[in-house]
Image (cartoon, helix red, strand yellow):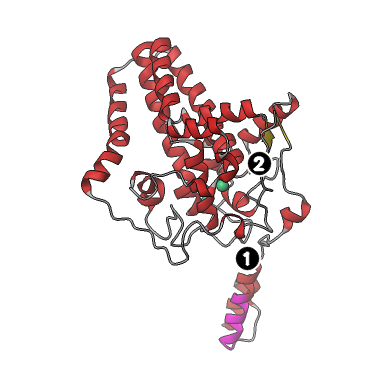
Amino acid sequence: MSAEPISSPNDPTTSGSTMFRGVLPPDAKPNRAATWVELSLRSGPFILLHLLALVAFWTPLTWTAAILYVSLFSLRTFGLTAGYHRYFAHRGYSTSRIFQFMLAWFGCCAVQKGPLWWAGHHRSHHRYSDTPKDPHSPHETSFWWSHVGWILSNEYTETPYEDIPDFSRYPELRWIDTFHIVPGITLAILCWLIGGMPGLVYGFLLSTITLYHTTFSVNSLNHLFGSRRYATPDDSRNNLWIALLTFGEGWHNNHHHYQSSANQGFYWWEIDISYSILVVLSKFGIVWNLRTPGNRALNYRRIRPTAKVTSLEQMAATAEGAGNGSRPLDGGTASSTAS
Ligand SMILES: [Zn+2]
Ligand SMILES: [Zn+2]
């Protein structure tokens, strides 16, 4: 059975359109106030998880634990990037209802709440990118807020079902979204059974924490550091290092440009591991209809590399404005002429 979405995907021409509009009232202002008790309750488990990871200093690293760390980091990164992000939030490809649920399960194993919660709030990020209504813009708030503060706050605790009606209609997805902690706890127990204490500490705890910060970097660092290929209305950036750590999510300016694409690395040199895995899965018929940008989308609102030329022209204009009458494009000549 195919799990097709209800409505058509967003693309450069519908990005920021009325598709998901109307969730917040036009004059809504984020209310970031929370009592210390509320914040402690919400932040407590997250901070406790980080403190528990310190047990690694007294826990030997075994081969089993190392394999669990790498494999579970990879599997869950794929669950988040290919599942939560590219499938649930953006519908970059199609798949069966069974694999759709598997993607939700793998994503939940990352302990970053449920697929409907994650994808619903992420759609809000795209709708209001780097504006006061963006849930996690580092420009409108702070680095801390964009990285983790918004998740720990009391503002975004509920699943915004109105933002994700296309997937909310599946009862099994609503179930796993409500009981999103079940896959994570199951995985922790499995790690314990397979690798003992080292399996639990490295395979589950440390890989979960690593996964938190690689994923959260896309929300924070990817809107601060990197290059911009497309003149998107936000401040998204392409960043190779984040792309390597997040299986391709670091090509964030590409992604903000063409949100419904299954690939975020648009060229062969833009490494995108999640997309490569999706291509392999498509050969086996597990996923299909992988959306990729065509030539028109690849060139639309592209920033031309003219900054250097402009800079030289400005230097020439400045020198001419100083009254020496020369063209100082070669610097030394201008200096000697002026003297
Ligand atoms: Zn996105
Ligand atoms: Zn973004």
Judge from the rendering whether residue 148 lies leftward or rightward of residue 215; answer left or right: left
> Where's residue 238, x and y in %?
57, 49
**In the image, what residue type sits under mark 2?**
Pro
157 left or right of 94 in image: left
Residue 247 visible, this orientation: no
The x, y position of residue 117, in whole percent, is 47, 41
User: Is residue 317 part of the magenta span, yes or no?
Assistant: yes
Task: Tell me if residue 95 comes above or below residue 328 in the rendering.
Answer: above
Q: Residue drawn 50% across and 56% down?
A: 23
Find out if the beta carbon at label 1 lies less than 8 Å from the nearest ligand 2 atom.
Answer: no
Q: Is 320 covered by the magenta stretch? A: yes
Which residue in the protein does label 2 denote? 5
Q: Residues within 10 Å of mark 2 (few under 14, many from 20)?
A: some
| Three-letter amino acid code at the position of disc 1 | Lys
Q: Over which residues does the magenta segment extend?
A: 314-324
User: What residue appears at the point 50 percent right and 35 percent down from the top-left corner?
Assistant: 174
**What is the distance, in whole Å, between disc 1 and disc 2 at their CAs?**
45 Å
